[in-house]
């Protein structure tokens, strides 16, 4: 029988789970926002409020980390995981804010596809976080997450290529600049999920 030499402290894992839950909810709100941008201000306010909740959770995590002498996993892993999940929320908010800043009045289908990927990634991330306290195997989650990240990268490349191909006027150049930034921000969000999962996987390997 494997002995657990680490203290039974569920506080950090509880915060991680709250962060993952908040990310999953925010991804769904972002997807809904893209489906109804006529209600842009209200949806952006909702996303911003959730990002603030994420900031509060990360601050709570940092305070507890500073106040705890012995942690259940390495301190740098706790900080890296909490910080990366906070980054996901920042990126989602950034994507929504760019659409408002650029006065976007329609949504390209590729962005809706990428939002669906975010929702799927967030569900996988939450499963990984829920397995973390027992350091359970994550191999069955890695493959679908990698497939989603690859799909997001492919969508991003094709969308940017399409923007350049369709660029014929000065106004097209303006639209290219706007949409390239929005689409690449969405792809960065998808990539960040893999960054979080890398930390989780590293912790599981250390303590398995």
Image: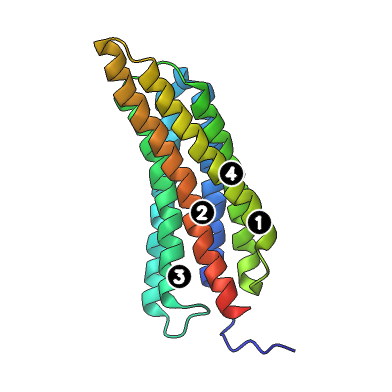
Could you classify mark 4 by the number of other residues whose Cα lies within 10 Å: few (under 14), some (14-19), or many (20 or more)?
many
Mark 3 or mark 1, earlier in chain: 3
Mark 2 or mark 3, earlier in chain: 3
Q: Do residues under tags 4 and 2 come within 8 Å of each other at their CB atoms? A: no
Could you classify mark 2 by the number of other residues whose Cα lies within 10 Å: few (under 14), some (14-19), or many (20 or more)?
some
- Of tags 4 and 3, which is closer to the observer? 4
Residue 122 lies, in percent from the top left, at: 57, 48
Look at mark 3 in the image and give the residue it sits on.
78
Assign a secondary structure to mark 1.
helix
Assign a secondary structure to mark 4.
helix
Look at mark 2 in the image and give the residue it sits on.
194
Q: Can see residue 185?
A: yes
Look at mark 4 in the image and give the residue it sits on.
148
In this picture, residue 170 sits left or right of residue 21: left
Q: Is residue 47 above or below residue 125?
A: above
Q: Quadrant of residue 48?
A: top left
Furthest-left residue in this view: 170
Q: Nearer the viewer, residue 40 or 120?
A: 120
Task: Calculate the distance from the C-alpha at mark 4 to the C-alpha at mark 1.
Answer: 11 Å
Q: Do residues under tags 1 and 2 come within 8 Å of each other at their CB atoms? A: no
Which residue is located at x 54 percent, y 57 percent? 18
Q: Quadrant of the N terminus?
A: bottom right
Q: Can see residue 10?
A: no
Could you classify mark 3 by the number of other residues whose Cα lies within 10 Å: few (under 14), some (14-19), or many (20 or more)?
many
Which residue is located at x 56 percent, y 66 percent? 201
Q: Do residues under tags 4 and 3 come within 8 Å of each other at their CB atoms? A: no
Residue 101 lies, in percent from the top left, at: 30, 26
Mark 4 or mark 2, earlier in chain: 4
Task: Calculate the distance from the C-alpha at mark 3 to the C-alpha at mark 1.
Answer: 20 Å
Which residue is located at x 46 percent, y 34 percent? 156
Residue 207 lies, in percent from the top left, at: 59, 79
């Amino acid at each position: 029988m494997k002995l657990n030499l680490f203290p039974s402290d569920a506080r950090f894992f509880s915060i991680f789970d709250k962060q993952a839950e908040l990310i999953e909810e925010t991804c769904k709100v972002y997807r809904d926002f893209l489906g109804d941008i006529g209600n842009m201000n209200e949806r952006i306010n909702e996303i911003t409020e959730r990002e603030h909740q994420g900031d509060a959770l990360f601050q709570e995590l940092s305070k507890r980390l500073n106040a705890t002498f012995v942690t259940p996993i390495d301190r740098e892993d706790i900080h890296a995981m909490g910080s990366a999940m906070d980054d996901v929320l920042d990126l989602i908010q950034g994507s929504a804010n760019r659409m408002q800043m650029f006065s976007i009045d329609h949504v390209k289908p590729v962005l809706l596809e990428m939002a669906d990927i975010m929702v799927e990634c967030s569900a996988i991330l939450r499963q990984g976080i829920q397995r973390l306290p027992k350091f359970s195997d994550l191999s069955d989650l890695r493959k679908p997450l990698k497939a989603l990240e690859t799909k997001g990268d492919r969508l991003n490349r094709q969308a940017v290529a399409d923007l350049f191909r369709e660029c014929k006027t000065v106004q097209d150049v303006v639209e290219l600049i706007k949409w390239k930034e929005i689409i690449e921000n969405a792809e960065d969000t998808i990539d960040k999920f893999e960054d979080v999962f890398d930390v989780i996987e590293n912790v599981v390997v250390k303590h398995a």
